[in-house]
Image (cartoon, helix red, strand yellow):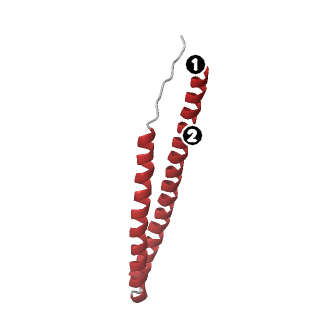
Amino acid sequence: MSASFAYSVDLARAREVVESLTSVESSVSEVVGDLRWRVARLHALWQGEAALAHLDAHRAWSAAYDDMHEALTALRRAVHLAAEAYAEAAATNTANWESVR
């Protein structure tokens, strides 16, 4: 008994995913920029143990955001490259089969 594998790729959906990830990255980056500006302004005036604890928490959050941003960027690039590769393979296969006719 032989196994048969079939799959399909929705290139339009892949483009939508890339556009969505780009939009999310842009929106989140804008919010993070504003938040970092606000925290910097806050800490120009706020001092003490609570301020230090807040800065520690903000640094941890900021590091987590940087990790998320890096992951979103890698995911967007991977989907984009995969969609391009599938589109190129489909075009090549179509051209090859048309030359056989």
Nearest to the observer: residue 69 or residue 44? 69
Q: Secondary structure at mark 2?
A: helix
Please say if 26 is above or below 38: above
Whole-percent x, y for residue 72 in the image:
48, 55
Mark 1 neighbour density, 10 Å: few (under 14) some (14–19) many (20 or more): few
Q: State if disc 2 and disc 1 touch (CB < 8 Å).
A: no
Q: Residue at x 46, y 34 (%)?
A: 9
Please say if 63 is above or below 79: below
Nearest to the observer: residue 41 or residue 15? 15
Q: How many marks?
A: 2
Whole-percent x, y for residue 34 in the image:
39, 74
Name the N-terminal-most of marks 1 and 2.
2
- Label 1 or label 2, whichever lies nearer to me, is 1
User: Would you identify the image quadrant in which residue 39 lies?
Assistant: bottom left
Amino acid, disc 2:
Ala
Circle number at residue 101 = 1
Q: CA distance from mark 1 to mark 2?
A: 25 Å
Amino acid, disc 1:
Arg
Please say if 45 is above or below 35: below
Q: Secondary structure at mark 1?
A: loop
Circle number at residue 45 = none
Q: Is residue 49 visible?
A: no
Whole-percent x, y for residue 33 in the image:
43, 72
Nearest to the observer: residue 6 or residue 95? 95
Mark 2 neighbour density, 10 Å: few (under 14) some (14–19) many (20 or more): few
Give the left or right position of residue 35, taking residue 101 as reference: left
Q: Is residue 83 visible?
A: yes
Q: Residue at x 38, y 69 (%)?
A: 31
Q: Residue at x 50, y 50 (%)?
A: 75
Quickly name the residue at label 2.
Answer: 85
Instruction: Name the quadrant of the C terminus.
Output: top right
Check the image and name the residue furthest to the bottom.
Answer: 45
